[in-house]
Image: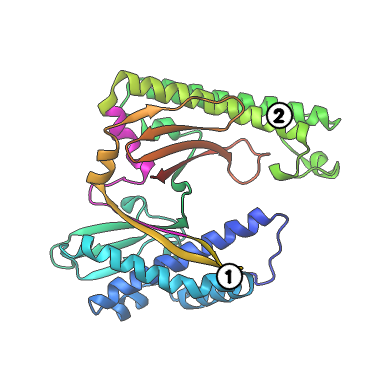
């Protein structure tokens, strides 16, 4: 990676730190599990040949940009491993594989949200593990989906899913056009259906954080239009068939398989004698399929608030948030739907 990479916003830098710390954390937890069964060498050599240099690049970059994090990561990984031990002690496995983003570029759909995979070479049993390293009391991302396939993919069991997906896709395109037209009008430009060179040459950016207040409100109205329809569709599904709805949102909560194990490691800051210590372990939560389904014994849709790009579904012991966001730039028509959980 480029060691001299620069950022236009602090949010971009924080996003990269979060990505790198997640990748390193996954690797470290997997290595601890592998060492326990005397498979550490095999675990390391099963990774791509470029992995070691990639890992060192990540560490070097973090040492310059967040040295305290580098020192805390092994401690957080070790604590998470010890919390996982009880949940995996009765499983039959003799190998550990890293299957998250760092090992292959993207998560393999076969293993859904898994970061690690425990496997029994003779019996063929496989046990996926999803790892999350996050700030205490925060929403934790569990699924990201594209706007043009969200309903079709996750609510296919409902008879009207195809019609609803078409309605959502049509609204997303129409709302994008309306947003683009309004922004170009405010900028004194003509809108041809896309944000072209004239937008950049006029001094405007593709990142929402760089818009003035009036333009930013236009963007918020665009997001709210789209999330309002998603809210209506999902609430209708819940009212029509609650059991089917619960099965449909399990993948949105990161539980795409019944044998999935989720491990959340929450960290936070502490101030003592005027000195702030960061990335201190606050709690670790290990969750399985039964735990997640138990939380779905209570499902209550929160109010859809004006001007927001998200809504919440209150569960037993957790809150599921569904939010629309730009893929990368708000100036492209594709939106993503972020699903995240806050555990109580």
As drawn, 308 above or below 108 = above
The picture places residue 163, in percent across and down from the top left corner, at 43, 20
Of the 4 image quadrants, the one containing the C terminus is top left
> Which residue shows up at 75% across the image and 26% down it?
182
Q: Which residue is mark 2?
A: 218
Q: Which residue is mark 1?
A: 273
Q: Residues within 10 Å of mark 2 (few under 14, many from 20)?
A: some
Separation of disc 2 and disc 1 at Cα? 46 Å
Picture residue at 82% right of the left edge, 39% below the top = 198
Element type where label 1 sits in the image: loop
The colour mode here is rainbow
Residue 146 horizontal/vertical position (percent): 49, 39
Q: Residue at x 39, y 19 (%)?
A: 236
* Number of on-image labels: 2
Q: Residue at x 25, y 76 (%)?
A: 36
Q: Is residue 128 magenta?
A: no
- The magenta span reads 244-267
Quadrant in the picture for residue 242: top left
- The crowd level at tag 1 (other Cα within 10 Å; few <14, some 14-19, many 20+) is few
């Amino acid at each position: 990676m480029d060691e001299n990479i620069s950022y236009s916003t602090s949010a971009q830098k924080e996003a990269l730190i979060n990505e790198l710390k997640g990748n390193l954390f996954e690797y470290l937890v997997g290595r601890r599990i592998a060492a326990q069964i005397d498979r550490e060498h095999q675990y390391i050599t099963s990774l791509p040949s470029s992995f070691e240099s990639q890992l060192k690049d990540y560490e070097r970059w973090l040492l310059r940009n967040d040295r305290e994090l580098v020192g805390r990561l092994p401690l957080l990984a070790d604590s998470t491993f010890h919390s996982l031990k009880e949940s995996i002690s009765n499983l039959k496995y003799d190998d550990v594989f890293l299957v998250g983003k760092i090992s292959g570029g993207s998560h393999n759909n076969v293993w859904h949200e898994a970061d690690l995979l425990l496997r029994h070479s003779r019996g063929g049993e496989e046990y996926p593990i999803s790892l999350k390293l996050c700030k205490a009391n925060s929403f934790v991302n569990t699924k990201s989906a594209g706007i043009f396939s969200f309903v079709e993919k996750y609510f296919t069991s409902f008879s009207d899913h195809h019609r609803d997906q078409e309605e959502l896709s049509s609204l997303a395109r129409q709302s994008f056009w309306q947003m683009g037209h309004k922004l170009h009008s405010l900028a004194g430009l003509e809108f041809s259906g896309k944000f072209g060179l004239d937008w950049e040459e006029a001094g405007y950016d593709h990142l929402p954080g760089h818009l003035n207040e009036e333009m930013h409100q236009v963007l918020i109205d665009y997001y709210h239009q789209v999330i309002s329809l998603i809210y209506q569709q999902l609430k209708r599904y819940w009212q029509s068939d609650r059991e089917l709805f619960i099965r449909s949102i399990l993948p949105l909560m990161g539980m795409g398989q019944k044998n999935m194990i989720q491990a959340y490691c929450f960290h936070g800051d502490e101030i003592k004698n005027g000195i702030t210590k960061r990335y201190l372990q606050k709690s670790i939560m290990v969750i399985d399929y039964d735990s997640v389904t138990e939380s779905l014994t209570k499902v209550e849709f929160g109010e859809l608030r004006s001007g927001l790009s998200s809504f919440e579904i209150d569960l037993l012991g957790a809150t599921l948030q569904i939010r629309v966001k730009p893929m990368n730039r708000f100036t492209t028509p594709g939106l993503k739907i972020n699903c995240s959980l806050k555990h109580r």
